[in-house]
Image (cartoon, rainbow, N blue to C red):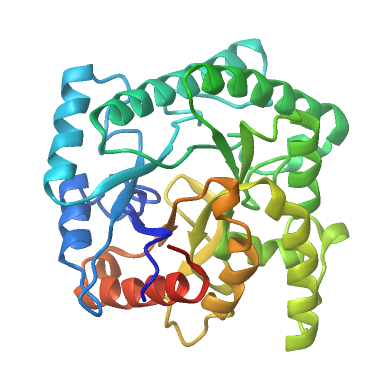
Amino acid sequence: MSNDFPKLHNAMWPGVVGKGTQPGEEPPLSLDRMLDLTTAAQSHDQAFDGVDLFLYLPHLDPAASESALRAMADGIQQRGLAIGSLVAPVWPGTVGDSAMGDEAARHQFLQAVELACRVAQVFDATGVRTSGVVRIDSAEFGVDKWRSDPKANTRKIADTFREAGRIAADAGQRLAAEGEICWAGMHSWKDMLDLLEEVDMPNTVGFQADLAHTYLYLLGYNAPEHALLSPDYTEEEFYSAYAEMVSKLRPWTMDFHVAQNDGQVKGAGSHDKTGKHCPPDDPNGKLDIVRCASYWLEGAKERGIQHICWDGCMFPNEVLENPSTWGSVLTTMIQVREAHGWN
């Protein structure tokens, strides 16, 4: 019997993140186009169950009226898709600002979380969204400023996250902090763990694990002192280090992204350098996706995870527009569910 859970979602933000209108930037792909590509994907007579959304223009206005949000939800549901996790627009230049910033910046960060929770509530009320989190990060690009006083700056981010957690709890939502090497205070597995423990709201503020990003945690790209692997590691050394890292972060993990990484660090548009996402069958991919997913999905049902999401952030438009990309992605997602899912 095939497993029913976790449901399989596709991320919509690869159509926006790293795209733009400046010279050398690729144009964004609209939400409708990303939805078209998602609904067209088929593998073994199965399709994607839903999508995770980026709550910012040009995909979605986080301050949109309730009627506009309900119309969007209806349109997605009519395509046979659910809505899952939502990315809050917490960064400078969107609604928010740095969680490590001054009082005004931190207020902007919290306003972005509040708007995201409002959108989540509207989607929940329509019935199109029954699982997922609101994703956040420190919205502090790079780690140089954080390094000026690591303990104090982690404490400041934690204070902001704790207040954001109260906003989320009041709205019936959970927040997941994305583990990614470009976000200050979250740029290594150890710093991420220290931050979550400082926040100390395990039922409300947790971790979002992404296979591509957490791979670079192992190598200590932005925190060599916390590296668990040398670049010339063996397979045995890799899985020993992987088990060690995941054992620390898995109890906090509320949201999980399936992805591939080729070991490179990439940036595009206004997005700072981070782990490079690759197609699942990339010949330079470093990860056995199905095996690595097993470490994160152990106990996932008990942690409230009902869906997993493919993340192809900063894929070139040529790759996004290729139907074979989505067939390959969906095949990999199905393999993960069959190996580690449940009914």
**Residue 188, can we see it?**
no
- In the image, residue 224 sits, relative to residue 94, either above or below, namely below
Spot occupied by residue 217 in the image (x, y as percentages of width and height): 71, 61
Q: Residue at x 28, y 57 (%)?
A: 49
Q: Residue at x 43, y 24 (%)?
A: 117
Pick whichever, 101 or 59, lies toward us.
Answer: 59
Pick whichever, 47 or 134, lies toward us.
Answer: 47
Q: Residue at x 21, y 46 (%)?
A: 31
- In the image, residue 270 sits, relative to residue 218, either above or below, namely above
Spot occupied by residue 86 in the image (x, y as percentages of width and height): 40, 38
Side of 134 relative to 226 (left or right): left
Spot occupied by residue 81 in the image (x, y as percentages of width and height): 22, 50
- In the image, residue 145 sits, relative to residue 290, either above or below, namely above
Image quarter of the N terminus = bottom left
Locate residue 21: give its quadrant.
top left
Locate residue 160: give its quadrant.
top right
**Residue 123, can we see it?**
yes
Image quarter of the C terminus = bottom left
Locate residue 310: give its quadrant.
bottom left
Q: Residue at x 60, y 70 (%)?
A: 294
Side of 278 relative to 275 (left or right): left
Spot occupied by residue 317 in the image (x, y as percentages of width and height): 27, 63
- In the image, residue 178 sits, relative to residue 197, either above or below, namely below
